[in-house]
Amino acid sequence: MEQYLVGVDVGGTNIRMGIVTPEGHVLKKIQYPTDMSLGGMAMMEGLVSKIKDFVREGTRGVHSEIRIGIGVAGPIDMRRGVLIAPPNLPDLHGFPLREFLQEKISLPTAIENDANAFTLGEGWKGAARGALNYCGITLGTGVGGGIVVAGKILHGAEGLGGEVGHMVLNPEGPLCGCGGKGCLEVYASGNGIRRMTLEAIEKSGGKGIVHKSKEDLRKITSEEVFEAAQKGDEIALKVFNDMGSYLGLGLVNLVNLFNPEKIVIGGKVSRAWDYFIGSTTEVLHQRAMKGQREKVEIVHAECGDDAGMLGAAYTALKLE
């Protein structure tokens, strides 16, 4: 009997799903926009319908064993299978995701946090292949992450562990969306880059990127800051250098605590790799303990947008 895995990555902007072999080969994949206009429950019902159609069409005529893995943004109480304040699905706080899927889909189904799924995908088929102890960091609108110890994702007591983006780097720093101050997320995310850019512009007295109109400046994005850095803009280059230094402090904490073989960095903001990684590694080598820092590799993610989908499929593969 053939075995197939279905990996589903539920993002705030897009939902990606793929049919994957147990060896990690993607046979078919689709992507469509995440529609939250009717609320989280309607989105979940639509997701189940889409998965059923995708499985039926993708395995037509084949007698097979099928397992499904789903990665969802936001903390998940893994013991109970319940969503905890998901940022993209606020009306689904406390939603019994595992129970819902078991009722709606008559196939073995695993659930996982999306950043953990990214980390597992990079460990299975990406930049952390072969490592048993590694960390993943996704730099996007926020900062997500996952920690793998002895080949298994670190969930913690309730499944809420591994919140890399909420390591406190500066207790007097800017307010974070989690309610704390000075988290890694306020410095190394797309939102953090935008904030630091606006602050730098205010202090600069009028250079480079500031030639935009005031109205345009209020709408500036991290992608535009990246484009400015590529053109040699002084403010943009300094922002990414500072962002890289803060990221380096976060890596120091991970390296000293977990002694990983690799740290994989991905996400949209990681496109600016060449503009921040120098200061990141400089801080890491200055501050991390000697034994740990000499062994760790800092690597750029390889799986692109497929990482979360592959990691979700991997969780299905490892279902007991």
Image (cartoon, rainbow, N blue to C red):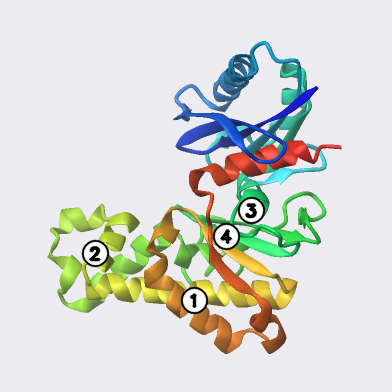
Q: Earlier in the sequence, mark 2 or mark 1?
A: 2
Mark 4–mark 2 distance (CA, rounded to whole Å): 24 Å
Mark 2 touches mark 1? (CB < 8 Å): no
Mark 1–mark 4 distance (CA, rounded to whole Å): 13 Å
Q: Quadrant of residue 299?
A: bottom right
* Quarter of the image where the C terminus is located: top right
Residue at 59%, 39% (x, y): give it: 309
Q: Pointer 2: what residue?
A: 228
Q: Quadrant of residue 286?
A: bottom right
Mark 3 touches mark 1? (CB < 8 Å): no
Could you tell me the amino acid type at mark 1? Answer: Thr
Mark 3–mark 1 distance (CA, rounded to whole Å): 20 Å
User: Above or below — where is 258 with respect to 319?
Assistant: below
In percent of width and height, residue 227 lies at 26, 60
Regarding mark 4 in the picture, which secondary structure is present there?
strand
Regarding mark 1 in the picture, which secondary structure is present there?
helix
Answer left or right for 68 relative to 192.
Answer: right
Observer-nearest of 308 and 154:
308
Q: Pointer 3: what residue?
A: 119
